[in-house]
């Protein structure tokens, strides 16, 4: 829920919570060169780096991270697993 302090700032998208001291370490890999159409279902604020995107492609899902044009992504997994990782990232429990 948004509080009064949130209203003072211009809302410009979803933000990840800062990583907790102990958090799941994501194995970021170079983008897989797969010939399938990737659909971005959700993404964090594009004005704050890194920008994260929840991507769905070919029945699988993964999270993409981009920092200054350098792109990495998680392993392509079942959608439920990628959703779990995405939710953990938003809570600062994975990074
Ligand atoms: Zn932002």
Image (cartoon, rainbow, N blue to C red):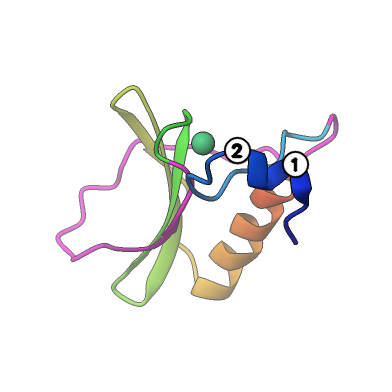
Q: Which residue is mark 2?
A: 9
**Residue farthest to the top, as pictured:** 68
- Left or right: where 92 falls relative to 33: right
Camera-side residue: 75 or 18? 18
Q: Secondary structure at mark 2?
A: loop
Q: Position of residue 78 (x, y in %)?
A: 50, 72
Magenta-tinted stretch? 21-45
What label sits on residue 35 in the rendered view? none
Residue 50 is one of the magenta-drawn residues = no
Residue at x 19% of width, y 66% of height:
37
In the rendered image, residue 18, in percent from the top left (x then y), is placed at 72, 34
How many C-alpha atoms fall within 10 Å of the one at disc 2: few (<14), some, or many (≥20)? few
In the image, the residue with mark 2 has its CB under 8 Å from the nearest atom of ligand 1: no
- Displayed quadrant of residue 25: top right
- Name the secondary structure under disc 1: helix
84 lies left or right of 4:
left
Tell me if residue 41 is in the magenta stretch: yes
* Location of residue 33 with respect to 62 vertically, above or below: above
Q: Disc 1 to disc 2, how far (Cα)?
A: 7 Å
Q: Residue at x 65, y 39 (%)?
A: 8
Image location of residue 69, percent across then percent down: 28, 26
The residue tagged 1 is 5
Q: How many marks?
A: 2
Q: Pointer 1 and pointer 2: residues touching (CB < 8 Å)?
A: yes
Residue 79 x %, y %: 50, 73
Which quarter of the rendering shows the C terminus? top right
Residue appearing at x 75%, y 62% in the figure = 1
């Amino acid at each position: 829920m948004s509080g009064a302090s949130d209203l003072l700032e211009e809302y410009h998208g979803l933000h990840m919570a800062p990583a907790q001291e102990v958090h799941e370490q994501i194995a970021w890999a170079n983008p897989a060169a797969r010939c399938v159409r990737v659909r971005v279902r959700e993404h964090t604020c594009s004005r704050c780096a890194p920008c994260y995107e929840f991507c769905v492609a070919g029945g699988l899902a993964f999270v993409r991270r981009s920092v200054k044009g350098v792109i990495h992504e998680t392993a392509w997994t079942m959608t439920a697993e990628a959703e779990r990782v995405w939710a953990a990232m938003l809570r600062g429990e994975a990074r």
